[in-house]
Amino acid sequence: MTSSRIVYVNGEFVAEEDAKISIFDRAFQFADSVYEVTAVLDGALVDFDNHMVRLTRSLGEMEIVAPLDEAALRAMHGELIARNQLREGLIYMQVSRGSADRDFAYPKGIQPTLIAFSQEKNLTASPYAETGVTVVTLPDIRWKRRDIKSTSLLAQAMAKEAAKRQGAFEGWMVEDGFVTEGTSSTSFIVLADRTVVTRPLSTAILAGVTRRAILKLAETDGIKIDERAFSVEEALGASEAFLTSASTFVLAVVEIDGVKIGDGKPGPIARQFHEHYLAEARKG
């Protein structure tokens, strides 16, 4: 028999087959919940503090009470890593408003639901780091509060599947002719003068934790950042493009909508960010 993965449910560590929440949980009925995904390298959490900053903001915007303080959440993550002997991969954590009889209005006096689980994943030796990835553009049909990391992800799932069916790794969502972000990543392009362009933070996009780290690395490396919207046309004519996320780190985009970006290979800026981010992540 193979050993079962251990997951966390409302204060208890249990085998995944024994994990249960109520059918009345508002995450299930309304996507009334938020989540975070934190990378794990060499058995250590990557950029956990900034994930907690974003979690706190999302909970505040949704008016959901934090189930645990940051120290307790960190300890829970550490216990999941230890119990599952996770060396490299991800920890997924989700907080819902809780369980109550179905009603659109927020119920009062209920306890939030907190779940978390680990996923083994090869983050550092992905073949895509060498080859780059392809992207297709798709209409952005999401709601207007994309800055909240909620579990209302149907539009992103539909776009991801549409991209996959076209043979692409990722979909870049487009609104009024401008790229907002990827289905599960932040989008960047690089101009001929080596300026990196990415959309500014607003309710139109999620504040990516890896995005934040890349902007900091750019300052350290002396790379100019221009935070503004960019069009699909501009992306197709860019010298380079890349995407970032907690689960992929930094990946070069070598093709958009069938058009090669630059020479169709990962460019020097994307490679530099990938190597520098990985080095910083390993420091813990």
Image (cartoon, rainbow, N blue to C red):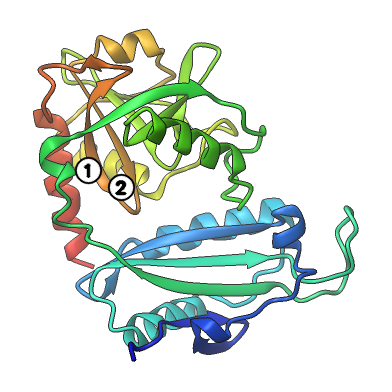
Marks 2 and 1 close (CB-CB < 8 Å): yes
* Residue type, mark 2 in image: Ala
Using the image as rendered, state which of residue 96 and residue 194 is in the foreground.
96
Q: Position of residue 227 (x, y in %)?
A: 39, 25
Tell me which corner region of the image, top left, top right, bottom left or bottom right, holds residue 194. top left
Helix, strand or loop status at disc 2: helix
Q: Position of residue 84 (x, y in %)?
A: 34, 83
Q: Residue at x 29, y 12 (%)?
A: 236
Q: Position of residue 246 (x, y in %)?
A: 35, 53
Tell me which corner region of the image, top left, top right, bottom left or bottom right, holds residue 212. top left
Inter-mark Cα distance, 2 to 1? 6 Å
Question: In the rendered view of the protein, which quadrant contains the C terminus?
Answer: bottom left
Q: Is residue 136 above or below residue 157?
A: above
Tell me which corner region of the image, top left, top right, bottom left or bottom right, holds residue 241. top left
Helix, strand or loop status at disc 1: helix
- Residue 213: give its label: 2
Q: Residue at x 76, y 58 (%)?
A: 29
Q: Residue at x 65, y 70 (%)?
A: 66
